[in-house]
Amino acid sequence: MDLKTFVIFLAFLCVCSWPAASVRLLTKSRWIVDEESGGRVKLACVNLVSHLESMLTEGLNRQPLKYIANTVFSQGFNCVRLTWATFMVTKPEYQSLTVTSSLMSLNLSSAVDGIRANNPEFLDLSLIEALKRVAMGLGEAGLMVILDNQVSKPQWCCALHDGNAFFGDEYFDPQAWLLGLTTVASAFINVSAVVGMSLRNELRGPRSNLTDWYTYMQAGAAAVHAANPDVLVILSGLNYDADLKFLAAKPVNLLGFGNKIVYELHWYSFTDGNAWEKGNANDLCGSVTARINDHMAFVVRNSSTFSASPLFVSEFGIDQRGVSVKDNKYINCFLAFAADGDFEWALWTLQGSYYLRNKQPGFEETYGIFNARWDGLRNPVFVAKLKPLQQPFQVPFSSSQEAWYQIIYHPASGLCVAVSKGDLKLDSCDGHGLFAFKASEEALGLSDDSQCIAAQGEGQAPVLSGICNNPNSAWQIVSTSKLQIAVNGSIAMLCLDGRSSPLLLTSKCICLMDSGCGNDEALEMQWFKVISTNRKYISNSTTT
């Protein structure tokens, strides 16, 4: 069964069996929870663009909305971060546009023809009504929606000097922005799929300053909450959403609705300049992760001055053609970070092409899940790697006391160490690999009995052993990335290695020092993350 046939079949099941997303969300400490049940809800989202010059959600000329929405759902995502531009609702010349007139003003008659063939009901809608119809269609497929104010003037984001960067820039009038937030929050108050609003994407540029950040972000949060108290309010930091460190000393004034506030983070390979193109990947992953934890991820932890809040990694992604060296190196470090922190997240991006980008009709998006024709996945292997992260690793508010254990996650494959008929291999993270790792005791074994993992030698498969006080069972985390798990071999350190997947081997540890770091792909096959979880017993409440 091909993807399109499967999605049509899935759409039938959704109509018959699965209700539209209509959950109301709150925050409780660092978690997002269902207001009714009190159970955790983990956001596992994908971005979908509606903020470019047409101000219309991409892809409606390529496929029916139902097909797009059900494809997202079929791949295990539970929400969409849907972008929009302020001018759509604050400028009279844009407010009066219909979908057809907007596209024709850009000489995109072929896009009009495509919408007439796939989604004809959109042609005469105003732009905001079209955005609402998209949100409702996503909800009908069982998806939640986060509305993201990406820019003021509709255009590609984000440059330092594009006029959209910070409060007071050419196109970024704070009062118009507040009006836009209020207008959109009010317009979507009865669209039950909409569970959150991001106030502004990637604040940046030479005008950036903390005084304006506190003034306007607090005002924006208050405006959204006053217009629609049901939605989460998501605040971005500075420096392209890579810096919230200032909050540690001075939290925002939440004006009585702190149980609706979420913070967001963006992290791409290019966030770190060209660093991922060279150097010791262990050192780089370790240092970058430490910086992200210090500048951003601290928000999930209580301190003397800051109360823990959820962190939404609302943009990350790679060139899905697999041709970018720095993307391919960064992504496995990122996935280990995201799994370890069990954060909310949104992949950039869904669209395989644009109506118009960089003045080019049909511009292809190589970071997109869809291919350029929107009729299949660009890289199914990469999308499958995300599945372990689509479910929560930690479920802190469950009704009973589930057992906690540890899994050994292998980000390069999206699999985990599992036990099958007494053998160790890489397999689904939802199964039979329940471990206990006590770093202080250098002990790694099964969580429910006295067996431990023992190395047999270089290039050989580790085994389960009842003898755990042996040097070949004394496991430790050895690298600066904190992602290599090793024992002392007779000649060199031996690391767990996934290069022979599904078979798990131990091999000579790569790149513990600066020498021998040329083969990054081989190194990343030795990256494993030990994660504490009770996921075995609980599934995500928003995923059927």
Image (cartoon, rainbow, N blue to C red):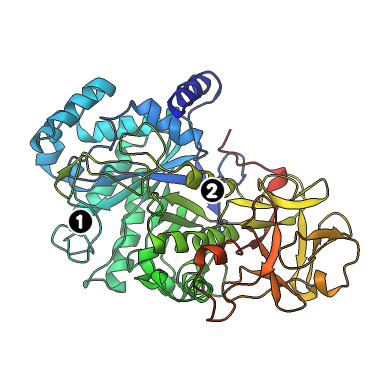
Residue 360: where, in percent of width, then height?
16, 45
Nearest the eye: 306 or 354: 354
Q: Report which residue position mark 1 lands on.
A: 175
Q: Callout 1: few (<14), some (14-19), or many (20+) C-alpha neighbours within 10 Å?
A: some
Q: Look at 25% across and 29% down and name the residue there.
A: 61
Residue 502: where, in percent of width, then height?
66, 49
Kind of element beneath mark 1: helix
Q: Report which residue position mark 2 lands on.
A: 385
Residue 315: where, in percent of width, then height?
40, 55
Give the Cα distance between marks 2 and 1: 43 Å
User: Left of 311 or right of it: where is 105?
Assistant: left
Count of labels in the image: 2
Give the amino acid type for the residue marked by disc 2 in the picture: Lys
Residue 507: where, in percent of width, then height?
68, 67
Q: Look at 21% across and 34% down and name the residue there.
A: 127
| Mark 2 vs 1, N-terminal side | 1
Kind of element beneath mark 2: helix
